Image (spheres, rainbow, N blue to C red):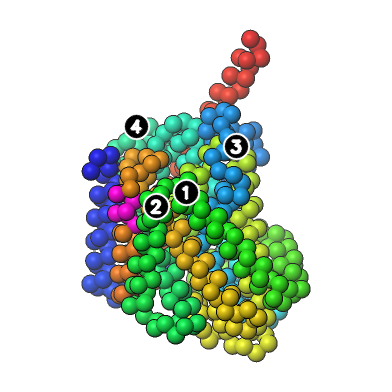
Amino acid sequence: MKNVSRVFYITLALVIITVIFGAVFPAQFEGITGSIKSYVATTFGWYYLLLMSALVIVAVSISISPWGKIRLGKDGEKPEFSLPTWTAMLFSAGMGIGLVFYGAAEPLFHYLSDSPTAETGSGKAFKEGLVYAYYHWGIHVWAMYGVTALALAFFQFRKGEPGLISTTLKPLFGDKMNGPLGTLIDVLAVFATVFGVATSLGFGAVQINGGLSHLFDVEVGFTSQFFIITVVTLLFLISAWTGLSKGIKYLSNTNLVLSVVLLVLVLVIGPTVLILNMFTETFGMYIQNFIEISFRTAPLESDNRSWLDSWTIFYWAWWVSWAPFVGMFIARVSRGRTIRQFLTGVLTIPTLLVSIWFAVFGTTSGNIQNKGTELTQYATELVLFNMFDQLPLSLILSLLAIVLIGSFFITSADSATFVLGMQSTYGSLLPANRIKIIWGLAQSSVALILLYVGGLQAIQNTIIAAALPFSFVMILMVIALFKALNEEYKKMEAEEEKKQSS
């Protein structure tokens, strides 16, 4: 095919081989990947904690530095998307299905089943569950996404380079990035994206199936999930065909509106005063203990290290594996903003929205549990719907949640097909529709096969293993970015002096 790079063929072959192995030998595949995941979490936990905290420092430092006035585009260029649309796109691509899937369940689980440091079931554990949810989904994640996206956007829109991960390393390695080494880096990024998104599609299908079963007694199983993924695939391929400025833009705005409506409804008809009090106190605890929890490694046996491996280290590796996809997408929709505007928005807006979301849904689920409804007996995907049963307007809330999950599902898959298309067509800003369709079908096929063999856990493990080498690429990206920004700023200063002297 014309304008298709080696990255496309190599990654597609690797995806097919991995899926076949996972489908034919599911137990062995899960065993091998589980061992790798455990080794990475235990051995490199300290590294992930330092990396994520360092990226927060990098993001804040760049945003307040003189480099912050550099524009991600030509001087005087205006942002391509309005602030509300841009915010909606950040929110949809960066978190999406995960927020609905874990919003009520994760804080509840920390509260009653597996608390980081507090006594399970105590008031302290209730608060701690919310604090750690903010931590796992908040500023660290968005700093990592922001720095990745900044490097991509700077080289793509300011320097005119192709929108590839490999091009961000040219200040360090030069033309070597046009050869096998660059191809290897881009293949790693595309591979992580395919499986990362496929896993989320699997989660989405399972939760939609759970919601439909809860409301309408639809059978829970592969047949229902096959139908759900097939319908959603058709919808996101139609959206992908229409392009970024139409399909994803409208879907992202719809997601934000539906999210706000659901959030406000639960806030109003749930334990409103308790939610507001819990958010105020726990968000304050998050800020107050930010440094301590950022560097908590639990080195002694009495420190509950297993909790850290299962939650924080898992999340950090999981988010790093998503960095190529989310970073590229955020970069693509951020053209025309200054670095300061970009980083300030990326660090603050999603962090605040995510924290409010967990405060509303986590407090409500904990409060309902405290009143005698045993929510912890349900699978993660069913906690939300059983929580709604204890609130007024339960049918409306559940239907709204199912529609929102479906909309997030479509947006995530649509965004990923666009990014995968870019990465496999030499960084084209307008990848051919046939390439996007191939990647869209590949993602859905991977999700279906994984659901069929019960391999979602194995693929999560695979992504965590793949995140480790990509984390080293991120460090090189930061070094290259610092070098390029310094040179660009000196160039701007020289041009400014020249203008003043003439």
Kind of element beneath mark 1: helix
The three-letter amino acid code for the residue at tag 3 is: Thr
- For mark 4, does the 10 Å Cα neighbourhood hold few (<14), some (14 to 19), or many (20 or more) residues? few
* First along the sequence among labels 1 and 2: 2
Q: Between label 1 and label 3, give the one nearer the viewer.
A: 1
Q: Which residue matches tag 3?
A: 338
Q: Name the residue type under label 2.
A: Ala
Point out the image quarter for the N terminus: top left
Q: Secondary structure under badge 4? A: helix
Report the Cα–Cα distance between label 4 and label 2.
33 Å
**Distance from Cα at disc 2 to Cα at disc 3:** 28 Å
Does the CB distance between marks 1 and 3 fall below 8 Å? no
The residue sitting at the bottom extreme is 372
**Mark 2 = which residue?**
240
Per the rendered image, the range of residues in magenta is 434-440
Residue shown at 63% from the left, 84% from the top: 390
Toward which corner of the image does residue 289 lie, by quadrant?
Answer: bottom right
Q: Is residue 206 above or below residue 390?
A: above
